[in-house]
């Protein structure tokens, strides 16, 4: 059974590159360009095995998305993806329900390795 990953990022380049990496690694990938679009997809029934979200986005940022996604998907692993290495943002993401943290730019091999750690059977 193919595992599905939901990528949320306002950078089209980032989405394309991560999506390509994940598809080559055998994942089914859905994408959204910001937190609001992502939440709409989740509310209309998208149930990914894993969510990877950028933190800094327009309309709804990653922290707000994580909080909202947690109400819908209690046990789905959520990785926060950001350029920031600030401890404050990490703590905030964790408090909101993030499972883990990835700092951009994230390499393909590293990304897949982290996914295998948080997603049993991936």
Image (cartoon, rainbow, N blue to C red):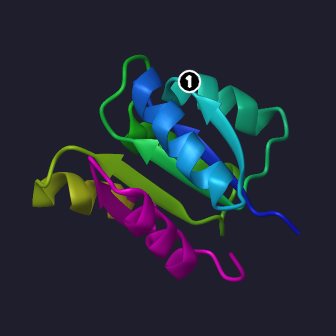
For residue 31: magenta? no
Location of residue 101 in the rendering, given as x and y in whole percent from the top left corner: 34, 62
Q: Is residue 78 visible?
A: yes
Picture layout, residue 55 above or below residue 102:
above
Q: Quadrant of residue 1?
A: bottom right
Residue in the foreground of this view, choosing between 62 and 10: 10
Q: What's the residue at 46%, 44% (across, down)?
A: 53
At 27% from the left and 55% from the top, the residue drawn is 92
* Residue 82 position in % (x across, y down): 28, 45
As helix, strand or loop, the secondary structure at mark 1 comes to: helix
**Which residue is painted at 71% across and 57% down in the image?**
27
Picture quadrant where residue 29 is located: top right
**Crowding at mark 1 (Cα within 10 Å: few <14, some 14-19, many 20+):** many
Q: Residue furthest right?
A: 1
Residue 65: where, in percent of width, then height? 50, 39
62 left or right of 70 in image: left
Q: Which residue is mark 1?
A: 36
- Who is closer to the viewer here, 37 or 29? 29
Q: How many marks?
A: 1
Tell me the quarter of the image containing the C terminus: bottom right
In the picture as drawn, the residue positioned furthest to the front comes out as: 24
Magenta stretch encompasses residue 109 = yes
In the image, taking residue 24 as reference, residue 82 lies left or right, namely: left
| Residue range corresponding to the magenta coloring | 96-122
60 over 111 or under it: above or below: above
Q: Is residue 17 above or below residue 110?
A: above
User: Can you see residue 70?
Assistant: no
Percent from the top left, x then y, of residue 80?
Answer: 39, 53
Q: What residue appears at the point 72 percent right and 82 percent down from the top-left corner?
A: 121
């Amino acid at each position: 059974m193919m595992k599905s990953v939901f990528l949320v990022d306002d950078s089209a380049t980032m989405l394309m590159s991560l999506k390509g990496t994940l598809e080559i690694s055998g994942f089914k990938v859905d994408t959204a360009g910001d937190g609001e679009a992502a939440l709409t997809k989740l509310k209309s029934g998208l149930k990914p095995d894993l969510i990877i979200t950028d933190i800094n986005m327009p309309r709804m940022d990653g922290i707000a998305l994580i909080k909202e996604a947690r109400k819908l998907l209690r046990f789905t692993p959520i990785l926060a993806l950001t350029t920031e290495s600030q401890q404050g943002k990490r703590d905030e993401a964790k408090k909101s329900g993030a499972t883990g943290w990835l700092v951009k730019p994230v390499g393909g091999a590293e990304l897949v390795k982290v996914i295998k750690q948080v997603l049993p059977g991936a």
